[in-house]
Amino acid sequence: MPDVRSMKSDAAPPYRLGTGPAMPADSSVADWLLALDAPEPMKQIGFERCDFKSSFMAELAKHLGVRTQRLYAIVGLPTAGNRKTVTGAPALATLGLLRLLKQVQEQLDDAGDVAIGFDGARWLGQWIEKPCRALGGRLPADLLDTPTGTKLVSRVIGAMQSGVYL
């Protein structure tokens, strides 16, 4: 399985920026994961104001191994319909999901040779669809439509790496 950093798409630009910093027009999931390293708060605020195009959502769903319709539900949209962009709170939830994917990739990088060939994106896509005891038996996916829920899921993923039982 490909490493998320090597993924590239020829799809249309995945987002529309309002007042945020510009990213290349051909940005892919992998481009976003690299861009999320930016420590500057103003850049992060710009990312939080982004809208994501439906083509980007389809690419993200493919990498996670979930149906696009399910991804829309995870980020707080009941149906994709003829939607061309994801805006507002669902776009912020999409960014949160990208940050979780980045977290998983960083944990795999830290694991070194043990993680070679492990598809972190697919693992995340499968894991968020399974009940989690640390989240009171809830599906992690059901919490990702809010920043607080995303933080809780991130904490559980972090605990997995360190072996802490929650």
Image (cartoon, rainbow, N blue to C red):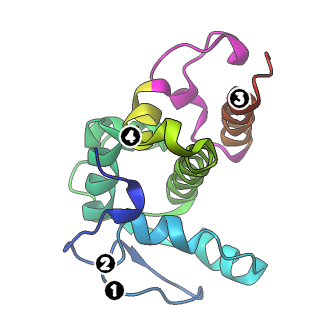
In the figure, residue 25 lies in which quadrant? bottom left
Q: Secondary structure at mark 1?
A: loop
Magenta stretch encompasses residue 141: yes
Residue at the spot of label 4 = 119
User: Residues at badges 1 and 2 in contact (C-beta under 8 Å)?
Assistant: yes
Question: Which residue shows up at 57% across the image and 27% down it?
Answer: 140
Whole-angstrom CA distance, mark 1 to mark 2, is 5 Å
What's drawn in magenta, residue-wise? Answer: 127-147
Whole-angstrom CA distance, mark 1 to mark 4, is 26 Å
Question: Which residue shows up at 56% across the image and 54% down it?
Answer: 102
Task: Check disc 3 and give the amino acid type.
Answer: Val
Q: Which circle marks residue 25 in the picture? A: 1
In the figure, residue 164 lies in which quadrant? top right
Q: Is residue 20 left or right of residue 160?
A: left
Q: Nearer the viewer, residue 141 or 24?
A: 24
Q: Secondary structure at mark 4?
A: loop
Whole-angstrom CA distance, mark 4 to mark 2, is 25 Å
User: Residues at badges 4 and 2 in contact (C-beta under 8 Å)?
Assistant: no
Residue at the spot of label 2 = 13
Task: Name which of mark 4 and mark 2 comes first in the sequence.
Answer: 2
Dot 3 alpha-carbon crowd within 10 angstroms: few under 14, some 14 to 19, many 20 or more = some
User: Residues at badges 1 and 4 in contact (C-beta under 8 Å)?
Assistant: no
Task: Name which of mark 1 and mark 4 comes first in the sequence.
Answer: 1
Whole-angstrom CA distance, mark 3 to mark 4, is 19 Å
Question: Which residue shows up at 31% across the image and 47% down it?
Answer: 63
Residue at the spot of label 3 = 156
